[in-house]
Amino acid sequence: MEELYEKSNRRLRNTSLDFKRYLHTHIDDTEKLIGLTGARGVGKTTVLLQKLKEKNIPPTEGFYASMDDIYFSKNRLVDLADDFLKKGGKYIFLDEVHKYETWSIELKNIYDTYPELHVLFTGSSVLEMAKTQGDLSRRAMVYKLETMSFREYLAYETKLNFPAISINDLLTKHVEIANDLLESGFKPYKYFDNFLKMGAYPFSAENKLSFYEKLRNTINLIIENDLMIVAGIDFSTGVKIKKLLMAISESVPFKPNVSELAAKIGTDRKHLYDFITYLERSRLINTLISDEKGLNILIKPEMIYLENTSLAYALCGDKPEKGMLRETFFYNQLRATHHVSYTPAGDFLIDNAYIFEVGGKNKTFKQIKNLPASYLAIDDIETGHGNKIPLWLFGFLK
């Protein structure tokens, strides 16, 4: 255990509290068992370490450990918790629990047996708590960390700090909000293109030149590692899932023809739906479904998007189609805090209340004319008017 303490201290010393993801303040630290899921590269480990560092307690009361540490090849988590509690321990922060085979049943045992202990853990976005061996769905408070918003990117990359805005304020006060930002000297299009290219993941700050190579490596790790561990897929299935991802990236937003797509990647309809589900749970794609069709896994999505615009540049090359980037950005920025679904009347239906069309500055209301609560999200403008709102402002919702 001393070795774990030492490693924990080393990680904490190298953890900065200068920038915190949007989810940081929403996590309720009073819960006994807290899970944090999300795609690789979005900053789950940093959130975990920051939460521990903020407590400012000695390692004998709280420490961090990664579940792929060699320590856990010979020691059980539940025994560690028992020993730690007897020595005055209070908080255990565990990273990448999916790499420890019996993680769910042991966390369940810790929750039920040691009520004094508080455990915060991270895991792959592929995890489904209700389907694990220990069924943690009724015990763990689980949060999902999404990729970065435009607002977060500005704070992280440029130290420009702006408050998040609500959807209601955005719809009713967007002219005032945009003018206030512009009068402060902020120029959105000085930064917006760079955000679209590599702003989704915090690790872009490490090395811009190798960012896309790292992102493509991350995609491979998600499919070849996380999906194989959590979903139990084999190598040949992983190859087919990669083919599906590339097929989607070549034509996004993608309106799937299930039979043709299944034939193209060498599978059947049932498995194709499984593969689409895996990619969405891995946070590599977003599917758009009509709420009228329900949540049946075998319902064909109306549209499929890449999860974020950084993935578009990594998979599609230097010049992805502009319309695709706009719609991908809009969907990505809304989905973290709002319900996004398909509507035949426009591009997106938000919270079953607002219809949006997304486009360039010449976009008109023709398609959504006379529809109540309908709006345009328009690129290449700094300010809007009426129900015409600058696209970049939707990056300030979280």
Image (cartoon, grey):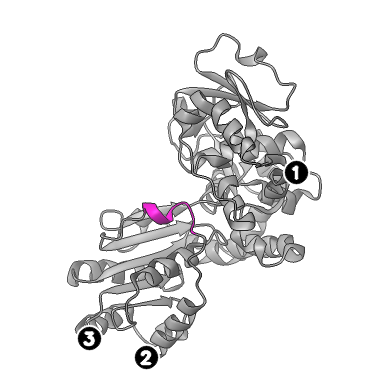
300 displayed left or right of 62: right
Q: CA distance from mark 1 to mark 3?
A: 56 Å
Q: How dense is the environment of label 2, judged by Cα within 10 Å: few (below 14), some, or many (20 and up)?
A: few
Q: Is residue 173 magenta?
A: no
Question: Does 261 sit above or below residue 65?
Answer: above
Which label is found at residue 2?
2
Type of amino acid at the residue the image marks with label 3: Lys
Q: Nearer the viewer, residue 368 or 123?
A: 368
Q: Residue at x 69, y 41 (%)?
A: 187
Q: How dense is the environment of label 1, judged by Cα within 10 Å: few (below 14), some, or many (20 and up)?
A: some
**Residue sticking out furthest to the bottom:** 2
Q: Are marks 2 and 1 in contact (CB under 8 Å)?
A: no
Residue 154 picture location, percent across and down: 61, 50
In the structure shown, which secondary structural element does the residue marked by tag 2 occupy?
A: helix
Mark found first going from the N terminus, 2 or 1: 2
Which label is found at residue 87?
3
- Residue 330 seen from this side: no
238 displayed left or right of 68: right
Q: Nearer the viewer, residue 140 or 239?
A: 140
Residue 202 picture location, percent across and down: 60, 60
Q: Residue at x 73, y 25 (%)?
A: 361
Q: Which residues are magenta?
A: 20-26
Type of amino acid at the residue the image marks with label 1: Glu
Which label is found at residue 237?
none
Q: CA distance from mark 2 to mark 3?
A: 12 Å
Mark found first going from the N terminus, 2 or 3: 2
Residue 95 picture location, percent across and down: 44, 70
Q: Nearer the viewer, residue 177 or 377?
A: 177
Residue 102, image quadrant? bottom left
Q: Is residue 25 magenta?
A: yes
